[in-house]
Image (cartoon, helix red, strand yellow):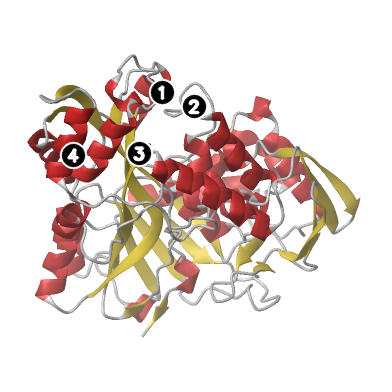
Amino acid sequence: MNYITRILGSAAVAALLPFAASADKADDTVRVAFAKDLDNADAYFSSARETTIFQFSIHDRLVERDPETGEWVGVLAESVEWIDDLTLEFKMREGVTFHDGKQVTADDGVFTFNHFSDPATGVAMPNTVDWIENAEKVDEMTFRVNLKAPNPAALDYVASSIPVYPAAYYQEVGQQGFARAPIGTGRYRVASIDPGRGYTLIAYEDYQELGPNRKKAVIKNVEVRSIPDVNTQIADLFSDAIEFMWQVPEDQAQRIEGRGGYTVVQAPTVRFGYISMDASGRTGFEPFTDKRVREAVNHAIDRTAVRDAFFGASSEIINSICSPIQFGCTQDVTTYDYDPEKARELLAEAGYPDGFSVDLYAYRDRQAAEAMAQMLDEVGIKANLTFLQYSAIAEKVLKNEVPMSFMTWGSGSIIDVSASTSKFFDGSDIDDVRNPELTALLEKGDTTIDPAARMESYSAALNLIADEAYWVPLWSYTSNYVMSPELDYTPTADEYVRFYDMSWK
C-alpha cells in the first residue's frame, strides 16, 4: 500500500466516525475550531490563512525570523546566504526526511522553486513567487535561487509562502493527488482529511531535532474542526469539546473572558485598516483630486472613537498606510486630528460648501463602517455605504468603479513595507494616486538591498502620502485567541497558529 492509499484510507475511516466528544490532555490531543474549512491541502493553490496554517504544520519553513532578534535562522535549511543581490543560496540539513521516509535533497528545492514560479502552474498568489527567475542545483544538498531583480523581502516570501515539496512524489501523484494526500518535512503528518468537517494531524515520529529552530511538536495529536458559527464554537468550548478558538470577535471574546476560567489573548497582527480615495480621478469622480477635500476626509474621521468602540484599546492608531510592525513603516509623518469644523471649512474652500455624495464600499466591520459614514455625513459628505464581498470590490476596482472604500490589508503577513504600501501606489491602472515621484520612491525601496537606504526611500514615500492626505490610515488589527486553562500558547503577529508550539500546563 503506497502513501496516498494509506492517507485516503484513513480519511475514509475518519468520515465514518464522529469527532471525539470531549477534549483534555489525557489523550494528548488538542482540538481546535476554525470558522473556515481547509479549501485546498496544496498550499500553493489557496490564499486562505487556514491553508497556510495547515501548510506549516506539515512542512518545515526553509528559514524563519528569530522572534527575539529578527535575524534569519535556518529550519529546513542549515544555512542561507546572499551570494549577490540576485542570488540566494540554501544549504539543506542532512538527515531530514519527508513523511514517506525519503531524504530531502537539493533536487526538492530546485523543483519547488522552478515549478511553482512558472506562470503556467497558476498558483493562487503569484506575487509570492513572481520574483523568482529560476533555481539551480549546486550539489546534493545545496541549491541557488536566482532573482529577476533585487528583492530585499525575498526571504520573507520564502518563509511565509514557499514550503519545499517532495519532487518525486509530487510529480508521481500530481497536484490533485498531492492535495488529497500531502506530505512534508514538518513536525506533524496528516492522519486524515475530512472535507467540510476538518482534519487530524499526528506528530511525525521520525522528526529529527536538528538545530535550535527544529524542535519536535510537544502535543501529539491535533484535531481541527470546521465550525462556521462562532456561537457553536463557544458552546463546544464551554462543553470541553474543543480547547482552542482563533479570530474570535471582540464582543464574544469579552463574553468568554467575563465568564472566567479561560485564557483570552488579544495579539497584534500585521493587518491594518484604511480609507482609500480616488485622488487621480480615474473613476471619473473629481472631488478627491483636490487635496483640501482629502484633508477634510482625514479630519472628519474620529479614528480613536471608532477604534475604542469596536476594536479595543490594544488596537493601535496608525499614521501611515502600512503596519507599524513592518520594516520601513515610519509613523513620523503629518497627521490630521479629528476636527469636523476644520473639515467643513476645507470643503467650502474647495468649492463644496454643501458637501457632496460618494459611493463608499466596504466588506467587513459593518458597525465601524457605519460609524465612519455617519462622521462623513456630519461634515457634509453623504457616503452611500455599500457592503460587498472582498472579491466583488476588487473586481469593481479593476473596472474603475470604486471612488472610496474602507478596506483592510494583511500583507500576507510579510513584515515589510514592500508588501503593503508598494502594492497600493505602484503606478498601475488601479493606483488611486498615480504619482510618479511616489512610485519611484517605493520602487527604490523595494529593489535596494541596503537597509538604511531602504528606510530613507520608504520614509520619503510615506511622508509624501501623508502630506498629500492621499488616503486615511486608520488602525492596526488584533486577533483574539481563546484557550482552555490547560493549554499554553503564545500567538505571533503573523497570525500563523503554530500547533507545534502548543503545550499542556
Displayed quadrant of residue 278 = top left
**Camera-nearest label, 1 or 4:** 4
Residue under numbered circle 1:
280
The kind of secondary structure element at disc 1 is loop
**Which comes sooner in the sequence, label 2 or label 4?**
4
- Distance from the alpha carbon under mark 1 to that under mark 3: 12 Å
- Distance from the alpha carbon under mark 4 to that under mark 3: 15 Å
Amino acid marked by disc 2: Arg
Residue under numbered circle 4:
343
Amino acid marked by disc 4: Ala
Residue ranking furthest to the front: 349
Neighbours of disc 1 within 10 Å: few (<14), some (14-19), many (20+): many
**Which comes sooner in the sequence, label 1 or label 3?**
1
Residue under numbered circle 2:
434
Amino acid marked by disc 3: Trp
Circles 1 and 2 in contact, beta carbons < 8 Å: yes
